[in-house]
Image (spheres, helix red, strand yellow):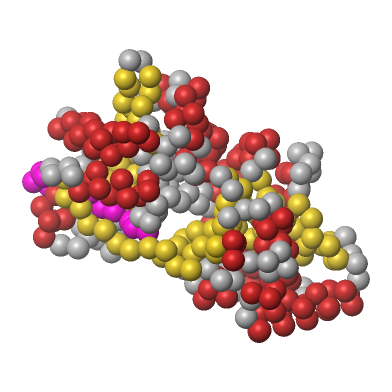
Amino acid sequence: MTSWSEIEKLQAEWNTLLEQSDANSVFLTWQWMDSWKKTCSAQTKPFFVVLKQAHKIVAIAPFYIQPYRLFKCLTYKVLRFAGDQGIGSEYSNFIVEQKNSLVLKEQLWSALLACHKTSQWDLIWYSNVASWSKGGETLLASLNNTARLHLKSRVVGFGNTDLSTLSEKVLPSLSKSLRTNIKQTQGYLTQQGNWKVSFCNDPSVLKIELQRLFELHNLRWQKAGIKGSFEKRPEMTAFYQHFAIKALQQGWLRLAKLECEGITQAMQIGYVYQGQFFALQEGFNPEFQKGAGQVLRYHVFQQCLKENLTDYDFLGQYTDHKRRWLAKERDGHNLLIWPNKIKNIFFNLMTIWPTGKYFKPL
């Protein structure tokens, strides 16, 4: 499928297929994909491979075509996973019937190879695969079983906190320094006036709350002398505005804010899906009380425990900050995949990655 009008017809069956798959994730829902479609560049060319059995959809591989140039002279048609840039997608995977997961993923690779023979694509750039999950395992196994495809992979660290080991108070499980920081900051906040943490559940104020998140996020990074994600990527701002409405309707949205004397000083946005919390973005006023962001995260952790969630998923880029919040590192992978053809010989001989020194998007 290479037109959005064709892809729209998948809506009725999409989430039903996803929910029983081995890769069920908020980043693969129809709502997420549809919001990406409606806020991505008008020049984005979709390339979805769909398998049907007796008119029933049994497998979907959602890609788009991104032209790249190697050594400033050779142009390649690269398949990238739908929604993988600009909006914060993670855990890319094929969506298939779970009972035949491995076989169906192998058939999707075979279908992609058939498309390659007609020169519809040259390479596949597959990012943020959750290799530790069942869906990640079957994706990698199906790829390794497809002999006509070459593969290079790079490890990507993801941070996740297992909430089942924590009490609802959270603090006793944290390090002494972090406990002290949170307690002292809450004391300083009380000295400054009335403060509280709340979550947005009102669609009539959602747009205003999101705008404040964007402002605080940008302020945080401007203080460090760089542009924040929402400032650098207007498409990310548009996506969050579009998807947050859908997420609130579905009960997925968790938009938290810390107010002091009626002024919002820190915010965090995430989504709850399949009993897990996915932390996407945050922001705080760097001119306000230091540590306010930590206090807000502490209260979000408490809310997660009240909801009996199993995980607080920090997503990609494992850092020391996430470790302090008891996150363990999980290894995912970025994959560069290519078939045999003359113009791909450089990828057989050299270690070349997209967006690197020699291989860049047009």
Where in the figure is residue 40, as x and y percent of width and height? 49, 40
Q: Residue at x 16, y 55 (%)?
A: 347
Q: Is residue 268 magenta?
A: no
Q: Is residue 302 above or below residue 74?
A: below
Q: Residue at x 19, y 63 (%)?
A: 351
Apparent side of residue 27 relative to residue 179 in the rendered image (left or right): left
Q: Is residue 112 visible?
A: no
Q: What residue occupies the far top of the structure in this picture?
A: 54
Query: Which quadrant of the figure has residue 49?
Result: top left
**Quarter the N terminus occupies:** top left
Query: Which quadrant of the figure has residue 45?
Result: top left
Q: Residue at x 68, y 66 (%)?
A: 167
* Part of the protein shown in magenta: 332-343
Task: Give the total number of marks visible in the rendering.
Answer: 0
Where in the figure is residue 232, as x and y percent of width and height? 53, 57
Q: Main secondary structure of the magenta part?
A: strand
Apparent side of residue 343 relative to residue 182 in the rendered image (left or right): left
Q: Is residue 203 visible?
A: yes
Apparent side of residue 196 relative to residue 33 in the rendered image (left or right): right
**Closer-to-camera residue (235/14):** 14
**Closer-to-camera residue (88/135):** 135
Query: Which quadrant of the figure has residue 300?
Result: bottom right
Q: Is residue 342 magenta?
A: yes
**Closer-to-camera residue (282/299):** 299
Where in the figure is residue 343, as x and y percent of width and height? 12, 47
Q: Is residue 278 above or below residue 18?
A: below
Q: Residue at x 37, y 46 (%)?
A: 135
Q: Is residue 139 above or below residue 33?
A: below
Where in the figure is residue 57, as x and y percent of width and height? 38, 23
